Image: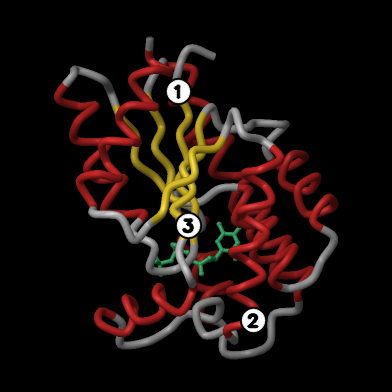
Amino acid sequence: MPGLFITLEGGDGSGKSTQMDALAEWLQQQGRTVVQTREPGGTDLGVEVREIVLHSRGEVTPRAEALLYAADRAHHVASVVRPALERGDVVIQDRYLDSSVAYQGAGRVLDPVEVRDLSLWATEGLLPHLTVLLDLDPAVGRERLEVSRTRYDRLEAAPDDFHERVRQAYLALAAAEPDRFLVLDATRPVDELQQSIRDRVSHLLG
Ligand code: TYD
């Protein structure tokens, strides 16, 4: 496929949206067509799944949670991401399958290999060309969220040890696939982080 698929990952409050927006603007200035999207919630169906999985009042068991994210991903990839990549667009996406491995695998303590395989089945094996991991101590992420949040979603409200497991899982994923991942310390200034991301993307675009 001629397009470029870039995903951003990291804990809640790590600054993914800020970096996404700046990256999209820079690429558009260079005449690239950019599709900015996210999971969960990048399609109409995804918006409904997002509401269930993040704000359901009742319990959502771990396997059901993993399947809901995978269902959102299957539909999103087939109807938005693949068509954009086939057109040659740059897709910049807030969260993808690494979120499932970190949150449902390490966080909810499901088998990370099974969770990854579920996503690969859902997406017919689509992996990003680049995944930017904004690494942050979850305690710092929580402080950042406290400034802006009036309500927490089900995942944000999970206890500190959950978020520490998520962080460690992300770092392990990055270590296992160093060519795909760019790991950045999310406490660095916003502009410096953006520059590091642009350097890497420039390299990929050749
Ligand atoms: P996000 O959109 O980053 O939250 P917000 O818009 O509130 O900043 O992500 C929503 C939550 O969903 C986040 O806590 C992580 C979780 N999540 C998973 O647990 N598994 C997944 O596969 C994905 C995509 C997200």
Q: Is residue 205 above or below residue 201?
A: above
Q: Nearer the viewer, residue 164 or 46?
A: 164
**Horizontal side of residue 166 vs 37, given as left or right:** right
Residue drawn at (64%, 90%) of the image? 58
Q: Amino acid at mark 3?
A: Asp
Residue 63 x/y as whole percent: 79, 69
Give the residue type that dot 2 points to.
Asp
Residue 136: quadrant of the picture: bottom left
Query: Looking at the rendering, in which quadrant would you find the C terminus?
Result: top left
What residue lies at 51% left-to-right and 66% top-to-bottom? 50
Q: What label does residue 4 carry, if any?
A: 1
Label 3 SS: strand
Q: Nearer the viewer, mark 3 or mark 1?
A: 3
Cα separation between marks 1 and 2: 35 Å
Q: Position of residue 33 (x, y in %)?
A: 28, 23
Q: Which residue is mark 2?
A: 161
Of 110 and 191, nearer the camera is 191
